[in-house]
Image (spheres, rainbow, N blue to C red):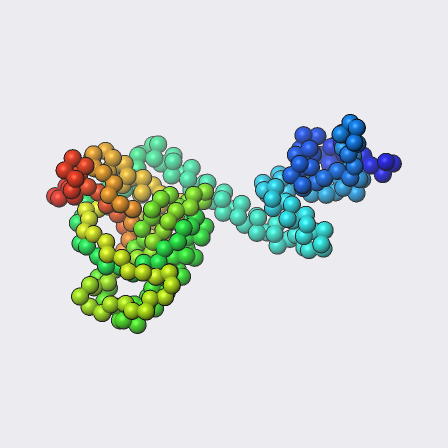
Amino acid sequence: MTNLLPIGQFAQASGLTVTALRHYDASGVLPPAHVDPDSGYRYFRRDQVRTAQLIRVLRQLDVPVEQVRGMLARAEAGADLAPALAAHLEAAEHRLAVQRALVHGLLTRLSEGVEMNHRVSVREGDAERVLVRAATVRNPGLDGFLRTAFQDMYAVAGRGPLTFTGPAFVRYHGVCDEENEALVEACLPFWTDGAQPADLPQGISVHNLPANTFACTEVSGPAAGFPAILTAYDAVADWISAHGFAFAGPVRMVYRRWTGATDAPGNRYEIAWPIEDPGRGQRPWGVGR
């Protein structure tokens, strides 16, 4: 017992509270060296102080407890923690950049309103036959999925060769951001009376989409980057709600101009939401003209 510190002294040496030490014991991150069978009092080895200090710093950096456990295991095995810490720092900087952009967008909305920067119009869309590749993703994995999906579908289209009838687009079946995952469909529309795809690889299918009326707005430059583009979705949703229409399907992001880089200033997207007149159960022909 001479080499052991009671939990109170260990807490002072490590900079962790007694409550935190009990939590890290229960979660398996930092079990004590000895627990008195009668009193349940915890004792820690003196050489565990540095481990506890490392845990304290990692948690101050908002490293999740599960990741802390894994990093400690790798450190005990002699692994270098520098790459993991660099990756965590990069992710933290990305989150901070997203939060800054969200705050800026919120301040603009509070002072000007989303309609000041996003003019919403209505257009008609014909029925379409499209190549589709779908996945359920969060925003951090969205760009990688879309690049691979469109590359694979363009390869399929080239074997036809298929005749494209419009720009590529993405359908979102829910909120796709840092915290929420959603079903996302990458879509390539092609001519129904021309060549048709054959021998489709796994994961690519053909869908027939009905004609729709869309409430739309366009974004370009910095407004087309994430998370600034979220205000465009909000503007269209607000317009639909304010004008009494129903949401008739998943929202689309249409590539009106694509430069090949996600945050390039030359990109131009259309946010298009299918709508219908809930009173008549049909598309609102002529609205906004």
The residue furthest right is: 2
Q: Nearer the viewer, residue 28 or 2?
A: 28
Q: Nearer the viewer, residue 127 or 116?
A: 127
Residue 72 as seen in the image, left or right of residue 288: right
Residue 288 visible in the picture: no
Going 19% across and 41% down the picture, which residue do you hit? 276
Residue 266 as seen in the image, left or right of residue 43: left
Residue 198 visible in the picture: yes
Residue 15: % across, % down: 71, 34
The quarter of the rendered structure image containing the N terminus is: top right
Instruction: Please identify the quarter of the rendering in which residue 236 is found.
Output: top left
Going 26% across and 71% down the picture, which residue do you hit? 161
Q: Is residue 18 above or below residue 253?
A: above
Instruction: Please identify the quarter of the rendering in which residue 164 is found.
Output: bottom left
Q: Is residue 169 above or below residue 160?
A: above
Residue 109: % across, % down: 34, 35
The quarter of the rendered structure image containing the C terminus is: top left
The residue furthest front is: 38
Residue 5 as seen in the image, left or right of residue 76: right
Residue 111: % across, % down: 34, 32
Residue 149 as seen in the image, left or right of residue 164: right
Going 73% across and 32% down the picture, which residue do you hit? 11
Going 31% across and 43% down the picture, which residue do you hit? 232
Instruction: Please identify the quarter of the rendering in which residue 157 is found.
Output: bottom left
Q: How many marks?
A: 0
Residue 155: % across, % down: 34, 68
